[in-house]
Image (spheres, rainbow, N blue to C red):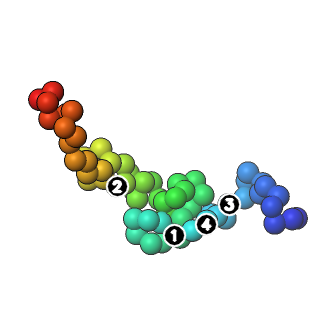
Amino acid sequence: MPDDAPLPANDPAPQTTGVCPMCGKPTQLKYRPFCSKRCADVDLSRWLNGVYAVPVQPTDEEDEES
């Protein structure tokens, strides 16, 4: 079988594609880029709670509207 051929759907072996950004374990294709549902949920929780916020500086126009 060529390396780029799709694997059968009934293949029980988990497939890894990299390293989980949350815990460093090998990632699982099902939860990519994470290794598990837990790490994916932790990341989602951080987004929803504002941990991953982009800092912005108000412009003069925004100051005038306040």
Q: Which residue is mark 1?
A: 19
N-terminal of the two: label 4 or label 2? 4
- The local crowd at label 2, few if under 14, some if 14 to 19, many if 20 or more residues have their Cα within 10 Å, is few
Which kind of residue does numbered mark 4 sit on?
Answer: Thr
Q: Nearer the viewer, mark 3 or mark 4?
A: 4
Q: Measured along the vertical axis of the image, is residue 11 above or below residue 64?
A: below
Q: Quadrant of the N terminus?
A: bottom right
Residue 27 appears anywhere in the view? yes
Relative depth, front residue between 26 and 53: 53
Q: Which residue is mark 4?
A: 16
Are dots 1 and 2 in contact, CB under 8 Å? Answer: no
Residue at image point 56% right, 61% down: 28
Q: CA distance from mark 4 to mark 2?
A: 20 Å
Q: Quadrant of residue 40?
A: bottom left
Which kind of residue does numbered mark 1 sit on?
Answer: Val
Q: Quadrant of the C terminus?
A: top left
Q: Residue furthest left?
A: 66
Residue at image point 77% right, 57% down: 7
